[in-house]
Each structure stands twice: as structure tokens, then as C-alpha cells.
Image: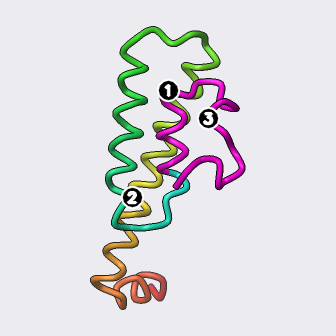
């Protein structure tokens, strides 16, 4: 999925070296591709965090992006588990 299809251009991003893979992960709709997108985004973010971020604004954006990836990963795991055990989610909500 290209960023331009979602209405954003890489040139529009303030920190494109890590925001581009991050946004591709957020916009990925195919479960088969999502894992690779998540890993690519996490790697780009962590590499940038190891170097010196440009500003406090970028540092905050990096931390926010990592939290966003964490949530997306957790939701992906929950989705996969719900496909394996569809009635477990119903049971949990009934208790």
C-alpha cells in the first residue's frame, strides 16, 4: 500500500525515515502482510531512537509511534486468537 493512496505523500511527513514505514503498518489491511509491516516500522523507529532525534517533538512522536505499534500488535494477536477460538471471546464478554 502506498502512502499516496491514503492521501499522504512521503514528502508531507516531518520525519519520513521512520514515519513512512510506521504509516504503512497502520494502513495495512492484509493480515498476511501486517507482520512484516509491523517489524519494519519497529526497526525504523528503534534505529532512529538510537541515533539522536532532531528535537523533543520527534522524541515524543517516536514514543507515541512505539505505543501505537504495541497496540496494533496486541490487536493483531487478539484477532488471530479470535479466529482460532471464536467462542472464547463471547464467553469472556458474558462473564
Closer to viewer: mark 1 or mark 2: 1
Q: Could you tell me how far apart the alpha carbons at marks 1 and 3 are, in whole angstroms?
A: 9 Å
Residue range in magenta is 1-25
For marks 2 and 3 on the same chain, the one whose residue lies earlier in the sequence: 3
| Labelled disc at residue 34 | 2
Q: Could you tell me how far apart the alpha carbons at marks 1 and 2 are, in whole angstroms?
A: 19 Å
Q: Secondary structure at mark 3?
A: helix
Q: Quick one: label 2, few (<14), some, or many (20+) residues within 10 Å?
A: some
**Mark 3 lies on residue:** 10
Q: Secondary structure at mark 2?
A: helix
**Mark 1 lies on residue:** 17
| Residue 50 in picture, x, y percent from top left | 36, 15
Residue name at image x 46 percent, y 37 percent: 66
Q: Could you tell me how far apart the alpha carbons at marks 2 and 3 are, in whole angstroms?
A: 20 Å
Q: Quick one: label 1, few (<14), some, or many (20+) residues within 10 Å?
A: some
Q: Are marks 1 and 2 in contact (CB under 8 Å)?
A: no
Amino acid at each position: 500500500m502506498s502512502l499516496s493512496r491514503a492521501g499522504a505523500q512521503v514528502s508531507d511527513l516531518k520525519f519520513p525515515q521512520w514515519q513512512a514505514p510506521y504509516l504503512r503498518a497502520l494502513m495495512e489491511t492484509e493480515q498476511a502482510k501486517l507482520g512484516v509491516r509491523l517489524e519494519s516500522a519497529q526497526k525504523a523507529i528503534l534505529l532512529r531512537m538510537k541515533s539522536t532525534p532532531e528535537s523533543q517533538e520527534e522524541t515524543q512522536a517516536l514514543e507515541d509511534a512505539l505505543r501505537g505499534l504495541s497496540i496494533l500488535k496486541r490487536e493483531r494477536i487478539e484477532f488471530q486468537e479470535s479466529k482460532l477460538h471464536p467462542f472464547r471471546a463471547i464467553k469472556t464478554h458474558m462473564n
